[in-house]
Image (cartoon, helix red, strand yellow):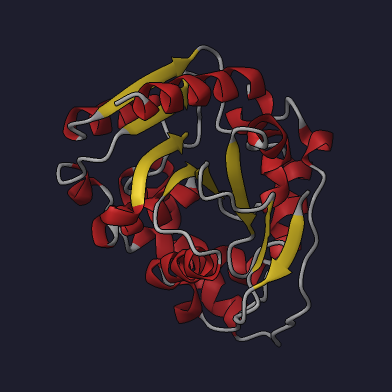
Amino acid sequence: MVTESFLANGLYYRTNGIDKEKLTLIFIHGLSGSSSAWEKYEQAFKVKCNTVCFDLRGHGKSKKWPDYRDYELEDQADDILLLSKTLGLKNFVVVAHSFGVLIALHLLRHHKEMISSAIFLTPVFTVKNVKWAKIAILPLIFYSKITSALPFKNKTGIQLDYSKFKHYGFWHFKRMASDIWNTTPRIYLYCLRQMYNFSGESVLKDIKTPILIIHGTKDTVVSLIYSKEAQKKLPNSTLIKLKNANHLLILNNLRQVISSIESFLNLNLKK
């Protein structure tokens, strides 16, 4: 039975219940998305695992905060710590997509004892090193400051039905517009700016936790090259390359991703 609730700070989350004898998976969605992207994963793992999904602050049903500083990665990571404390979790597995990987890396840097293993799906490690991001930084700051001068609307968003966007590419206008409008351009730009401030690559060599990286060969947002380079720095990692998969492989390559996660979890549970 799935239970929905909110933390004291307005963070929306849901869980299938916490059985202390089972492994717990905490799913972290990407920028401008929401936890509804994980619904098929919740169904796939609900028998063997505790599943915990939540909307990042400012996303989906979670409370929207007005200021740029409200979206620092440290605060995003603290939300997960508060969530784990509320649910009585001492350790868990992180499953993170894209932007969510940066938050997972922050947790691995400062609270590695809580994370038994981590799964990175089409990960971003250091945004400012990505080619398109180098070009976008100045316009990003400019438009972010413009939106911050506009009246703030704290109305929460909704859970989008991502089945409507299955097999779409990341850059599909309708999908992007739906996501950004639900999150609001203000918060989308705030989070994107915060991504530039974090260098995940400097953390990698110190992470001893088992890591699974799944990346598509046709990812035009973050090239597979970055995951190949990251794997060399991560001492206990595995990289799976999905042929012809794009940045939205969590939606478009569902069976392959779930199967890879199951194999990884089974392998590490035996150790």
From this viewpoint, is residue 61 visible? no
Front-lying residue, 246 or 86: 86
Image height of 239 relative to 3, above or below? above
Q: Residue at x 50, y 64 (%)?
A: 88
Image coordinates of residue 120 in percent, x first then y, are 43, 37
Q: Residue at x 35, y 24 (%)?
A: 270
Image coordinates of residue 214 in percent, x first then y, are 44, 26
Front-lying residue, 165 or 117: 117
Count of labels in the image: 0
Residue most toward the top?
A: 243
Q: Residue at x 34, y 43 (%)?
A: 116
Image height of 208 relative to 150, above or below? above
Image coordinates of residue 123 in percent, x first then y, are 42, 39
Residue 23 lies left or right of residue 131; in this view the side is: right
Image coordinates of residue 166 in percent, x first then y, are 76, 29
Q: Residue at x 65, y 24 (%)?
A: 254
Q: Which of the image's four quarters has the C terminus?
A: top left
Residue 161 lies left or right of residue 137; in this view the side is: right
Q: On the image, which quarter does residue 227 sit in? A: top left
From this viewpoint, is residue 159 visible? yes
